[in-house]
Image (tube, rainbow, N blue to C red):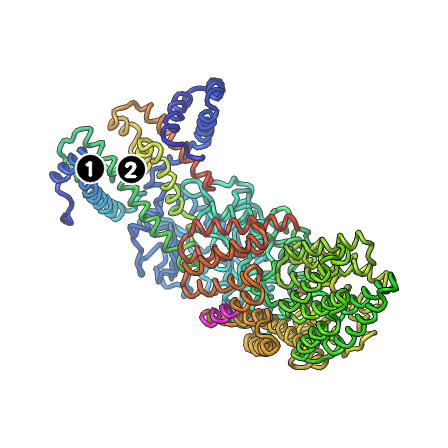
Amino acid sequence: MTTLPPERFRAARAVFEELVELDPEARRARLDQIARGDAELARAVDALLEADAGASGFLDAPAGVAARALVADWLGGELDAPGTVVGAYRLVGLLGRGGMGEVWEAERADGQFEQRVALKLLKRGMDSEEVLARFLRERQILARLTHPGIARLLDGGMSADGRPYFVLEKVDGLPLTEHARRAGLPLEGRIRLVLAACDAVDSAHRQLVVHRDLKPSNILVTGAGEVKLLDFGIAKLLGEGDGGAHATALGLRALTPAYAAPEQILGEPVTTATDVYALGIVLYELLTGRLPHQRPTSSLAALVAEVEHESAPRLASAVRQLDGEELTRLGFPERAGRRLARSLRGDLETILARALERAPERRYASARELADDLARHLDGRPVRARPQSSWYRATRFAKRHRLAVASAALVLVSLVGGLSAALWQARRAEAAARESAANAHRAEHTKEFLISLFSVADPLQSGGETVTARQLLEQGAKRLESELAAEPGLRADLLEAVGRIEASLGLLDAAERSTTLALELRAGAGAAERASAEATLGAIHIQRGDLASAAQLLERALAALEASGAEPLTLARVRSDVGQVKFWNKEVVAAEALERSVYETYRAQLGEEHIETALHLRNLGVLLDDLGRLDEAEAAYRRSREILVKSLGENHPHLGQSDLSMAALQNKQGRFEEAEANFRRALENRRRTLGDHHFQTGQTLQNFAHFLVLRGRFDEAERTGREALEIFRAANPKHFEVGKCLNGLGQVAARRGDPAGAERLYREAIANFEESLGRRHPFYWWTTGNLSKVIAAQGRLAEAEALQREALRELESISGVESEDAQWVHEMLADTLRLAGRAAEADSAAARAREISEKLRDHA
Amino acid sequence: MSAAGADPTEITALLRAVGQGDRSALDRLFEQVYGELRRIARRQLRTALPAATLDTTALVHEAYLKLSGGGPWSTRDRSHFYALTAQAMRRVLIDHARRRTRQKRGGRMVALALDDLDLPVIERGEELIALDQALARLEAVDPELASLVEWRFFAGLSVEEIAELREVSDRTVKRHWRLARAFLFREMAAQGWSA
């Protein structure tokens, strides 16, 4: 209830007191009457009356009874001592102590048997009727269960001071996760552990017993490798009511948050599928060393809120994130990651998805069914579970990792570079020539100039070094001034072309200068005349990260070109750039549609096997890749490469780019070995065709380094990243690629547990981005976000928080209030606040992140 | 104050001072009552084997006898005293609930492995704290109802005892109790606790 102010509450209280003793009809009549004068008051009273109806029994037991476990614990309720004789047993040592019971290791007092047993004894002061009932119920349930996988009930009775106890087979074992780790069990061994647990759980299910609290500490593996289930303390007999046996004093539910099925947390009926869910979590944990969900334990309210927002866990991606160290900690061989992730894709992922479905009726109905599918998987037979669409929707919602400022996608999507721009420019000139004989001269000059300049300057053609290309461009710019001063139209064409090349080299300032100059030279011309230069400027703004102004320029250019009936390829070229803006704005679906139409245009105009058609097919692949349509993306990459090889042979830089795209895709699919082979092939291509010091060699190195970071191969990652950094620095120390490299190296340091080193690198990266891209570019803020994390890791929480709040503000303005970027920062902020002990604020930041994530998913 | 307990004369004087609005007397009195409650509770649980639960009612009455020295107090004094005792009882339980909840947070995995033999992880400590917070919200709008909850739930006084101390009818106490309970029930539900 939004709490009323005191004077309003007093009014409500008076009415409540008047109505509470009336019958429902009289109440209703009186409430209606009040509502006419004061609707708010009537609502408040109505709500209180409703609560009164539901609250019978609430707080009936005084605190001393309701909270007895707590009180007993506080007062240090007497412990039994070793040596005490209970029934026929002598207590040897305490194994564990809970709120109500103690579990002792015990031996026969008469020395008849050597065998040690576990004796569960009610704690002193705990023998209320309810607790007794629960204790006896556990004993009764255990008596039903005779299965080698369940700790056996041996005996039971009453101690001398009148407390009940029962005796169980003592299990010397480790929690199954711990056993798997210590034994270094391979995948199959881990699955077999879960199979054995399923078997035991199934035998309980057949006795109509649901365990309700399965988790590693209750599933032990003995020295002989046998799996044993323990602790049926909150088990339930099916067919009985949910009963008070597991309810807490104020009527709440008993559960272990991390392993509880949604229906347990939400208070819905419990079935055998509830145990299936817990077994699914245990399996997930065995395979990844992690829990699929981060669930708060602060309150049931927080837990309920979390569970209502949980999405399906993703096994393969969890495994992909494991680094060598984590794999070792899990007991896998350090280099098993790639193979492991591959074996987890497909069946196992599907089986887990089925076991972990939110709705119990969509899960395996029993432990038996889960076991059957696991056995089928091990035998290589087809499993029964089918992928669920919700599951796939969730996996498709692949979150772009901000640490991956240096990720392949950025390179992949920088669409066709210098060469095609030059060709485009030349074609545009040819078209102009066809239109008017007067322009023939201009077209001729354009082509000549372009050929002389670009045959050497375009890195894709020359294989020469970027530095040389820059010098040539500078010479070209001078020549433009001296030779063509009298022909502003031609000079403008050429400036535009030069601007394109400069942009492809990352010389954004120069590119913008050239293009702006071209536009100025066309100041008097019509919209159509200016359109191409505007489009070029738009493309430059994309690289600057200024998407708003890029979109404006490109769309204006496109409209003008469409209105003037420009030729299809010209339109397609601009559309492709518009598509790129959409890609960056996360309108990937629209981008894909645009790029598809671009590709179709090229195919119609130039033929399917034309190089440029193939390059646009590859771009289409990039977008499909981003949309998670990985099979289609792979087909596009393969076809595109095929065409390129046919025309260009293996020894062309374009092929390197193709291999890089494929590597990124395979990395995403968890095909790490193939991805690595393609990264290496791309790198070799770059070194061979462009040289060791070429800019694009640097980009390839950088992508490979990022891959190595994710694989946990930090030494190789650092070496590779440093090589890239040196290349970029030599080419242009102010290029944003330098910043990306520094960010990547910061990531290596952070992952290695060196936050101070990471901080230095991130700060250097940020300084670079500030100069190269400006503070409006997301890279600046992404890296700021990364920085804030390592600052928080050094305990400087206030500083981290300030950075995060600033990043949030800026990214909200750049990418939108409900963007992935904003979600990411909210998540970081939640972590920082949690570290600072500000739990309520942390919860609300986390809730905000979730809310955004939900919305984004709904829109996806 | 000696370990053996408080001097009844001093308690009576403090009570009077509290009646006249002396804040520092209230604090001192509260400390006395708080300490006495803990002592009695410990003894109660240690000696009564096999004990039932913590009998807060008996506890509060015993504290009364001890602190008043058996001397006759006016209804008004007694009422003050019980209000204070109920508050102290609330504090005793909530303080402990908080301590326990904090302990749990550190080293969660280990704590779970040892501690969840019987007790659920979401346990009474957190429920009690949530109740305490709901009660604080009730206090803000209606201190009288809030104090009733302390008497009834935390101190375990019966409707009849409360009616006598407050000099109202049983029926009035019951009506007030229903309202207070409905309020808390709604507050707890709004925080996601289900009853």
Which residue is rendered at x = 64% and y = 48% of the image?
A: A858
Specify the quadrant of the image occupied by residue A202. bottom right
Image coordinates for residue A170, horizontal then vertical, percent: 44, 61
For mark 1, name the chain: B
Image coordinates for residue A171, horizontal then vertical, percent: 46, 62
**Residue A196 in view (yes/no):** no
Amino acid beneath label 1: Tyr
Give the mark, 2 or 1, whose residue is nearer the N terminus.
1
A345 or A6, which is in the foreground?
A6
Q: What residue occupies the far left of the structure in this picture?
A: B9
Q: Is A579 situated left or right of B135 in this image?
A: right
Image coordinates for residue B161, horizontal then vertical, percent: 26, 29
Amino acid beneath label 2: Ala
Q: Is residue A548 above or below residue B139?
A: below
Which residue is rendered at x = 58% and y = 50% of the image?
A: A818
Report the disc number at residue B64. 1
User: What residue does disc 2 label?
Assistant: B155
For mark 2, name the chain: B
